[in-house]
Image: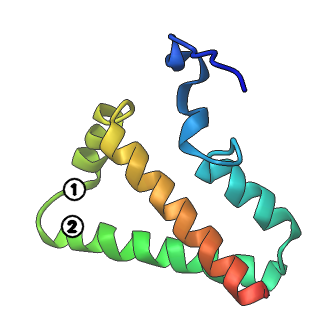
């Protein structure tokens, strides 16, 4: 048994966060290529519908498209947004995979 300990664990970045060494995004794109395309399209449409509902809610609160674009630009580097984006991909993969079984 090896007693080697890597003192610089940061060399691998986010690799350790995912058992298979994939990001949620790459997992989605891999699954989307091989899954039933009707299911993939249906689930992707549901995500876009959710986006449209959120946009409408923001507009109803007086938050216009310019403010939304500014916020998107401001959050290009944002761990919370990255995590939320990853969660959307994970949820999408889960819904696709469970329907294809």
Report the side of 13 relative to 38 (left or right): left
Which residue has dot 2 on it? Answer: 59
Q: Is residue 41 visible?
A: no
Q: Nearer the viewer, residue 46 or 20?
A: 20
Q: Is residue 70 above or below residue 7?
A: below
Q: Earlier in the sequence, mark 2 or mark 1?
A: 2
Report the side of 76 relative to 93 (left or right): left
Q: Which mark is residue 3?
A: none
Please report the residue visible at 70 percent of the width from the left and 21 percent of the height from the top.
2
Near mark 2 (Cα within 10 A), the count class, few <14, some 14-19 or many ≥20, is few
Question: Dot 2: what SS?
Answer: helix
Q: Is residue 101 visible?
A: yes
Please report the residue visible at 70 percent of the width from the left and 55 percent of the height from the top.
27
- Quadrant containing the N terminus is top right
* Extreme residue toward the left, this view: 61
Near mark 1 (Cα within 10 A), the count class, few <14, some 14-19 or many ≥20, is few
Per the model, the C-alpha gap separating discs 2 and 1 is: 6 Å
Q: Is residue 100 above or below residue 67?
A: below
Residue 6, horizontal then vertical, whole percent: 57, 14
Residue 19, horizontal then vertical, whole percent: 64, 48
* Extreme residue toward the top, this view: 7
Which residue has dot 1 on it? Answer: 64
Residue 64, horizontal then vertical, whole percent: 22, 56
Q: Is residue 67 above or below residue 59?
A: above
Q: Are marks 2 and 1 in contact (CB under 8 Å)?
A: yes
- Quadrant containing the C terminus is bottom right
Which of the 4 image quarters holds residue 63? bottom left
Question: Dot 1: what SS?
Answer: loop
Please report the residue visible at 28 percent of the width from the left and 49 percent of the height from the top.
68
Q: Nearer the viewer, residue 1 or 63?
A: 1
Please report the residue visible at 28 percent of the width from the left and 32 percent of the height from the top.
74
Which of the 4 image quarters holds residue 45? bottom right
């Amino acid at each position: 048994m090896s007693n080697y300990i890597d003192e610089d664990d940061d060399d691998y970045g986010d690799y350790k966060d995912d058992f298979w060494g994939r990001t949620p995004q790459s997992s989605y794109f891999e699954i989307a290529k091989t899954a039933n395309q009707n299911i993939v399209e249906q689930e992707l449409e549901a995500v876009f519908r959710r986006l449209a509902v959120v946009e409408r809610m923001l507009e109803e609160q007086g938050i216009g498209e310019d403010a939304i674009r500014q916020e998107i630009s401001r959050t290009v580097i944002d761990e919370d947004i990255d995590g939320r984006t990853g969660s959307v991909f994970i949820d999408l993969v889960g819904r696709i995979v469970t329907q294809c079984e």
